[in-house]
């Protein structure tokens, strides 16, 4: 069907199940997903810390997962399966008679519908925060920003389509997801802590190293988007490419990955030689394990010529690496009730991080 140049190949109606177009099934799936989330979220009307933490975890999974489905769009050359935004075509919000094959249009349209699920989870978490008694302003503030970030993702996605998948807009689309994930992880961590003063759980040197790993991790992800913008999987055969020396950009990306691994090992050693809490030590070893796994995938896909499946798996690995870096950073400090902290604090954390953490 995909290779058929006739009109049927250019209409998503060509893919049918039980005589119903695939795009209709996708819309139904998205609607059913939102309804299921709302039904599951009935407990948010009287939220507890435990239920809120589960929804916070879902917030992380959905916001990180949308980047992985976006990679699927890219490696299947489906980025312009819906050539317009917010409509799919000039005349329709759904993929009917598009300029691309039916399967490409279905993949891109499916990724767009998943955005509604991501937004639904974000709104559910916000409503839960507003319903919580006593209400926590710190949680409400974070919960209110997350849906705005998801909405921003949609806007950047539109710019990506309008720019015909220019690598700069594709990179911005992915990196915005990583910024939203920071908020979702911060929210999840703060759900587990009381309101109070932020104090270090590790030595200041370890806190500084964890902060440096966050910066280095983000630069590593940004370098990865340059490799992507230079590689063969642009999302469409006509998508522009950076045109940089591929060997050079890959080496830079690889060097940053090695630096991140070295920093993670140094962090693990530093924490092991101190009386750091078990959570921080565990997170440091988890980060090392994730980076090593990601490295194996990265070198394998490079040697095999970037097969599509490994590219998607590598994007999943990048999301897990980023989350592991953030979890390690947040494990280096905790909030304690000012009226009666349970443990002797090491000292106050840096004020710049206090608002987020």
Image (cartoon, rainbow, N blue to C red):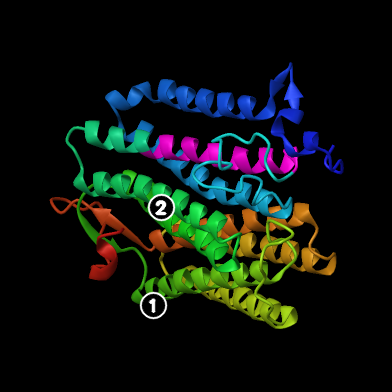
Q: Is residue 56 visible?
A: yes
Position of residue 4 relative to residue 289, above or below, is above
As drawn, 188 above or below 176: above
Q: Position of residue 2 (x, y in %)?
A: 83, 41
Residues 251 and 176: in front is 176
Q: Is 269 left or right of 306, judged from the image as shown? A: left
- Between 292 and 40, the one lying in front of the other is 40
Q: Is residue 278 visible?
A: no
Q: Kindly report the secondary structure that dominates the magenta region of the rendered protein.
A: helix
Query: Residue 75 in magenta?
Result: no
- Residue beneath label 2, please? 152
Rendered location of residue 20, percent (x, y) = 69, 20
> Residue at position x 69%, y 25% from top?
21
Q: Which residues are magenta?
A: 101-122
Q: Residue 313 at what x, y percent from top left?
A: 70, 53
- Residue mark closest to the camera, 1 vs 2: 2
Q: What residue did someone put label 1 on? A: 205
Graded by Cα atoms within 10 Å as few (under 14), some (14 to 19) or many (20 or more), the crowding at tag 1 reads: few
Identity of the residue drawn at 36% across and 21% down: 42
Quadrant in the picture for the C terminus:
bottom left
Q: Is residue 120 magenta?
A: yes
Chain-order first, disc 1 or disc 2: 2
Badge 1 element: helix
In this rendering, is residue 141 above or below 353? above
* Residue at the (60%, 67%) spot, across then down: 167
The x and y percentages for residue 99 are 70, 45
Along the horizontal axis of the image, is 223 left or right of 239?
A: left
């Amino acid at each position: 069907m995909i290779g058929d140049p006739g009109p049927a190949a250019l209409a998503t109606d060509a893919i049918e199940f039980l005589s119903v177009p695939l795009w209709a099934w996708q819309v139904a799936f998205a609607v059913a997903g939102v309804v299921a989330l709302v039904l599951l979220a009935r407990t948010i009307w009287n939220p507890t810390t435990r239920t809120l933490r589960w929804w916070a975890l879902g917030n992380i999974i959905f916001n990180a997962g949308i980047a992985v489905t976006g990679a699927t769009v890219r490696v299947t050359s489906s980025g312009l399966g819906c050539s317009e935004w917010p409509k799919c075509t000039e005349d329709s919000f759904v993929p009917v008679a598009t300029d691309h094959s039916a399967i490409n249009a279905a993949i891109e349209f499916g990724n767009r519908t998943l955005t509604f699920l991501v937004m639904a989870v974000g709104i559910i978490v916000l409503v839960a925060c507003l319903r919580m008694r006593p209400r926590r302003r710190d949680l409400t503030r974070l919960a209110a920003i997350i849906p705005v970030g998801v909405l921003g993702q949609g806007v950047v996605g539109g710019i990506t389509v309008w720019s015909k998948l220019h690598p700069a807009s594709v990179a911005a689309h992915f990196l915005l997801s990583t910024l939203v994930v920071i908020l979702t992880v911060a929210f999840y961590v703060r759900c587990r802590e009381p309101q109070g003063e932020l104090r270090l759980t590790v030595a200041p040197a370890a806190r500084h190293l964890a902060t440096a790993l966050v910066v280095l991790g983000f630069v590593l992800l940004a370098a990865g988007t340059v490799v992507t913008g230079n590689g063969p999987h642009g999302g469409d055969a006509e998508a522009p490419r950076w045109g940089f020396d591929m060997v050079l950009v890959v080496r830079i990306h690889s060097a940053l990955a090695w630096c991140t691994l070295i920093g993670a090992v140094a962090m693990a050693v530093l924490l092991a030689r101190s009386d750091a809490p078990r959570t921080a030590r565990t997170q440091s070893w988890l980060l090392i394990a994730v980076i090593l796994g990601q490295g194996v995938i990265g070198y394998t896909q490079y040697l095999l010529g970037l097969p599509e499946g490994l590219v998607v798996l590598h994007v999943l690995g990048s999301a897990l690496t980023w989350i592991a870096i953030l979890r390690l950073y947040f494990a280096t400090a905790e909030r304690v009730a000012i009226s009666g902290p349970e443990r002797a604090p090491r000292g106050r954390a840096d004020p710049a991080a206090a608002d987020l953490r």
